[in-house]
Image: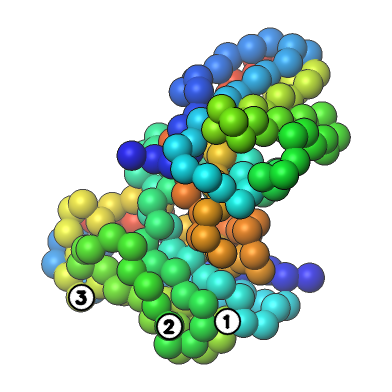
């Protein structure tokens, strides 16, 4: 069966520091992969999605970037974090339509 | 604005009662999904209903879709304290991309 992993689970970073969040999927090939951010009490904002290795689409302009170096690996990065980058980051994969989410990373930027 | 918007924002009921949540959207869709999120966790897929379907059931869940009104409802029958969570609808208009609403927070009191 398919599983999706995210790490770390929680992260506290100072403003201006770099960021790297990793997501990996097991048990499937060539999945669509997604990064979402969720503000407290709100829905999910799609940040990036990828339909294949090296293929990244950005939905919202910001100081974040994403990369997909391997078929089942999706990385969210930033060179310099802002206070507004705080939130709950969720990775998801999808065969089609239905999305399967990882456990999320709680990021606090101080 | 959000493609999917849930109503009400918050709902509090007693165990054993039924809970109904609604979702409205603006554009034509391929399918609509409902997800559940426990506090601080990732989203869990509950049910997907396609645009040519009007009703689907899964255990204590019943989902309806009215494409003429661009709306959907999620009914949870005989609610339990463990149903306490946030519920999100997501619409899928292009292959592999979903747009989420801000969710309904359901509290089931024992």
Looking at the image, which residue is at 79% across and 70% down?
A1
In this orientation, which residue lies closer to the viewer: A56 or B104?
Answer: A56
Q: Which residue is mark 1?
A: A72
Looking at the image, which residue is at 20% across and 67% down?
A63
Q: Which of label 2 and label 1 is nearer to you?
A: 2
Q: Is residue B29 above or below residue A2?
A: above
Label 2 marks which chain's residue? A
Label 3 marks which chain's residue? A
Q: Which residue is mark 3?
A: A79
Residue A8: tell me if it is visible.
no
| Residue A66 placement, left or right of B86 | left
Structural crowding at the residue carrying mark 2, measured as other residues with C-alpha within 10 Å and reported as few (<14), some (14–19) or many (≥20): few
Q: Secondary structure at mark 3?
A: loop
Mark 3–mark 2 Cα distance, whole angstroms, equals: 20 Å
Looking at the image, which residue is at 50% across and 23% down?
B7
Q: Which residue is mark 2?
A: A55
| Residue B40 placement, left or right of A17 | right
Query: What quarter of the picture does the C terminus of chain B occupy?
Result: top right
Structural crowding at the residue carrying mark 3, measured as other residues with C-alpha within 10 Å and reported as few (<14), some (14–19) or many (≥20): few
Q: Position of residue B13 (x, y in %)?
A: 64, 12
Query: What quarter of the picture does the N terminus of chain B occupy?
Result: top left
């Amino acid at each position: 069966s398919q599983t999706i992993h995210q790490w770390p689970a929680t992260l506290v970073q100072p403003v201006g520091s770099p960021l790297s969040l990793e997501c990996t999927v097991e048990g499937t090939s060539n999945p669509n992969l997604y990064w979402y951010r969720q503000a407290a009490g709100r829905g999910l904002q799609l940040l990036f999605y990828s339909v294949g290795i090296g293929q990244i689409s950005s939905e919202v302009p910001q100081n974040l970037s994403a990369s997909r170096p391997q078929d089942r690996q999706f990385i969210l990065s930033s060179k310099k974090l802002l206070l507004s980058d705080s939130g709950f980051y969720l990775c998801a994969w999808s065969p089609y339509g239905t999305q399967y989410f990882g456990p999320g990373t709680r990021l606090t930027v101080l | 604005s959000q493609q999917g918007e849930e109503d009400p924002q918050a709902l509090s009921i007693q165990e054993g009662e039924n809970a109904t949540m609604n979702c409205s959207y603006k554009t034509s869709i391929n399918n609509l999904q409902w997800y559940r999120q426990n506090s601080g966790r990732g989203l869990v897929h509950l049910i997907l209903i396609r645009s040519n379907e009007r009703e689907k059931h899964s255990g204590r869940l019943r989902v309806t879709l009215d494409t003429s009104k661009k709306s959907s409802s999620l009914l949870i029958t005989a609610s339990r304290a463990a149903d306490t969570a946030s519920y999100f609808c997501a619409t899928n208009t292009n292959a592999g991309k979903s747009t989420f609403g801000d969710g309904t927070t359901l509290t089931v009191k024992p």
